[in-house]
Image (cartoon, grey):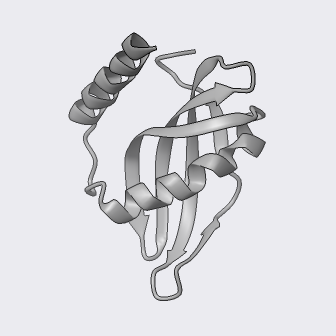
């Protein structure tokens, strides 16, 4: 188990080091990712525990945050799966209201099918 966590953390560091984004991944963006992660089950069709690995391809337009969310999913049979979701969240900072814009598109992670 420890080896698996170490590998995941190594992958996380490598992906973040190689990703080039126009916008910095701030604490607000990480909070949006953590808010969205458990809600991805209906789009991945996998029940289980969702952990955010990376946020990449961030684009911000007014109060809309569009990004790719890389997830580690532990399903109910304790298998680990990598998934990526492209999504847009409208975040009204003044009222702390968050909602999805459109339907998130999820599938197997391109590097870890």
Which residue is at the front of the view, 33 or 22?
Answer: 33
The quadrant in which residue 25 appears is bottom left
Residue 4 in the image, given as x and y percentages of width and height:
43, 14
Q: Residue furthest front?
A: 2
Q: Residue at x 64, y 64 (%)?
A: 101
Residue 3 x, y percent position in the rendering:
38, 11
Point out residue 74 in the picture as x, y percentages from the top left corner. 62, 27
* 96 to 38, vertically: above or below: below
Height in image: 11 above or below 33? above
Q: Image height check: is 102 above or below 38?
A: below
Q: Find the residue positioned furthest to the left.
A: 17
Residue sitting at x 46%, y 50%: 67
Q: Quadrant of residue 9?
A: top left
Which residue in the rendered view is the most extreme toward the bottom?
Answer: 94
Asked whether, in this view, residue 88 is left or right of residue 19, the answer is: right
Give x and y (percent) for residue 94. 46, 88
Residue at position x 51%, y 73% from top? Answer: 91
Q: Residue at x 59, y 38 (%)?
A: 50
Q: How many marks?
A: 0
Quarter that holds the C terminus:
top right
Q: Which one is nearer the viewer's eye here, 4 or 101?
A: 4
């Amino acid at each position: 188990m420890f080896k698996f966590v170490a590998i995941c953390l190594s992958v996380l560091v490598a992906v973040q080091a190689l990703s080039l984004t126009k916008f910095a991944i701030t604490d607000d963006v990480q909070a949006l990712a953590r808010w969205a992660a458990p809600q991805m089950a209906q789009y991945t069709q996998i029940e289980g525990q969702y952990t955010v690995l990376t946020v990449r391809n961030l684009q911000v337009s007014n109060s809309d945050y569009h990004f790719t969310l890389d997830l580690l999913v532990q399903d109910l049979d304790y298998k680990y799966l990598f998934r990526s979701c492209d999504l847009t969240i409208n975040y009204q900072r003044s009222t702390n209201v968050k909602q999805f814009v459109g339907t998130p598109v999820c599938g197997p992670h391109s590097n870890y099918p």
